[in-house]
């Protein structure tokens, strides 16, 4: 209930701030003789600009904000709502073009600076959306994209604010102009917080890499111990942002799930698959290297959802947060039934297979189902994909009494969630997390 109330509060605050500019407009003088289309255009412009500024807040990783939802949900919301804000902002000039039946405003050489500001802001926003949605197709490295993304966001917000002040309508009073500058300043401050203040605080809490283990299937286990401090507590299934080969101010910072037990206080382990430039050199990481960790984050944990038992369904490297849950349950000496369905391309990609089987000695009610797409001739497990028919063969007798945790690539998550709904698993009992947030 506490998380539900918190979630409603933060969502309500987001809506309130998004509409705040419209409220401010009604408190001050308004230019007379404005038609409905013009007023609607201005309203959309103000709302879109407020939503643009709020994106800095969504990505600042405040734990009190992400606690009700999980940071993965907030980042997905950030992506979706950014597109909505972009369309709302585009509607602002589109309505004016439709009203005047003219595109003369695009003749920038004939326009005042405020028009230049507007066009520059929209171009920056367009570039931001394009490079984000099609980052992989454009072959933009994650680190390069982060620099571009942040820079374009600042440019878009700054020039949009310049356009609003330049036009002057609806913000004629000094206090209204101050409010807009304050909102823009808060957005930039949030960016500085995540890029400067938080990394600076992390320099006081470094970690040492004590073990780098090849798990097979191009997966690595990285163990880190606190260096001069007590570390941090986390819930099984959560993740953190990890920085290696540099300082916490480096751009190369990536989210990875913890695989160690939440009851383990001496170290923290991450399970990482080679998926890009950053992860392709993990085997070369020397022991004793300095690491920096920003976490924990996420609401994907059984410790938040008491139940008679648990069903965990993992795809590929999506096993990492679930591995943390299994290890934690074993440390608790938990006797509740746990069903693990683990799908991968080949048997070699069933990371942690040997340890999972060994955990059955400590988790007497752990049942495992392994599914591979490309099976060898002597394979005796399941093949193909996890679907409703397969689930019916293995799910517990009373599926509504269990909580379900899904982690893996998006196509698998979507299909498995639909399959669970088909076999009458309540939607409120299904918890899913993508293994790739960015």
Image (tube, rainbow, N blue to C red):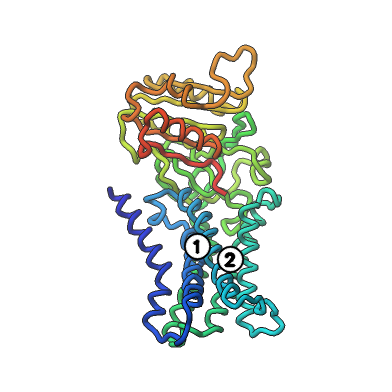
Kind of element beneath mark 1: helix
Give whichever of discs 1 and 2 has the lower sequence position: 1
- Viewer-closest of 173 and 2: 173
Q: How many marks?
A: 2
For the residues marked 1 and 2, what is the alpha-carbon distance in whole angstroms?
Answer: 9 Å
| In the displayed structure image, the side of residue 403 where residue 89 appears, left or right | right
Q: Residue at x 62, y 32 (%)?
A: 214
Pointer 2: what residue? Answer: 153
Above or below: residue 126 compared with residue 45: above
List x then y, in percent, for residue 321: 48, 37
Query: For residue 62, what is the image quadrant?
Result: bottom left
Crowding near the residue tagged with mark 2, few <14, some 14–19, many ≥20 C-alpha atoms within 10 Å: many
Kind of element beneath mark 2: helix
Q: Residue at x 44, y 46 (%)?
A: 298
Extreme residue toward the left, this view: 1
> Disc 1, disc 2: CB below 8 Å?
yes
Pointer 1: what residue? Answer: 55
Crowding near the residue tagged with mark 1, few <14, some 14–19, many ≥20 C-alpha atoms within 10 Å: many
List x then y, in percent, for residue 356: 48, 24
């Amino acid at each position: 209930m506490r998380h539900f109330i918190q979630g409603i509060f933060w969502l309500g605050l987001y809506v309130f701030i998004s509409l705040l500019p419209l409220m401010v407009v009604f408190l001050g003088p308004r230019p007379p003789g404005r038609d409905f289309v013009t007023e609607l255009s201005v309203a959309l412009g103000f709302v879109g600009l407020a939503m643009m500024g709020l994106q800095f807040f969504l990505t600042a990783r405040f734990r009190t904000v992400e606690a009700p939802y999980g940071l993965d949900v907030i980042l997905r919301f950030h992506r979706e709502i950014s597109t909505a804000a972009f369309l709302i902002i585009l509607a602002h000039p589109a309505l004016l073009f439709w009203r005047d039946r003219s595109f003369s405003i695009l003749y920038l050489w004939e326009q005042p600076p405020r028009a230049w500001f507007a066009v520059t802001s929209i171009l920056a926003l367009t570039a931001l959306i394009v490079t984000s949605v099609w980052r992989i197709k454009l072959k933009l490295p994650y680190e390069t994209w982060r620099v571009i993304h942040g820079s374009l966001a600042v440019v878009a917000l700054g020039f949009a604010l310049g356009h609003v002040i330049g036009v002057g309508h609806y913000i004629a009073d000094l206090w209204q102009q101050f409010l807009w500058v304050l909102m823009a300043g808060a957005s930039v401050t949030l960016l500085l917080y995540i890029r400067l203040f938080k990394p600076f605080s992390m320099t006081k809490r470094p970690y040492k890499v004590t073990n780098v283990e090849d798990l097979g299937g191009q997966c690595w286990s990285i163990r880190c111990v606190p260096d001069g401090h007590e570390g941090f507590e986390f819930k099984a299934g959560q993740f953190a942002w990890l920085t290696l080969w540099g300082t916490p101010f480096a751009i190369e910072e990536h989210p990875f799930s913890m695989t160690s037990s939440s009851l383990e206080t001496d170290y923290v382990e991450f399970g990482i698959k080679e998926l890009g430039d950053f992860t392709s050199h993990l085997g070369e990481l020397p022991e004793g290297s300095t690491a920096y960790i920003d976490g924990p984050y996420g609401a994907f944990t059984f410790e938040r959802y008491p139940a008679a038992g648990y069903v965990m369904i993992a795809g590929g490297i999506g096993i990492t947060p679930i591995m943390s849950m299994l290890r934690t349950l074993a440390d608790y000496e938990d006797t509740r039934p746990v069903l693990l369905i683990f799908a991968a391309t080949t048997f070699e990609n069933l990371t942690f297979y040997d340890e999972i089987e060994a955990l059955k000695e400590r988790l007497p009610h752990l049942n495992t189902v392994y599914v591979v797409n490309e099976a060898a001739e002597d394979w005796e497990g399941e093949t193909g994909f996890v679907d409703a028919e397969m689930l019916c063969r293995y799910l517990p007798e009373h599926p509504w009494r269990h909580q379900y945790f899904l982690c893996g690539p998006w196509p698998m998550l979507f299909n498995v969630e639909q399959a669970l709904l088909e076999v009458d698993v309540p939607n409120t009992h299904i918890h899913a997390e993508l293994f790739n947030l960015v």
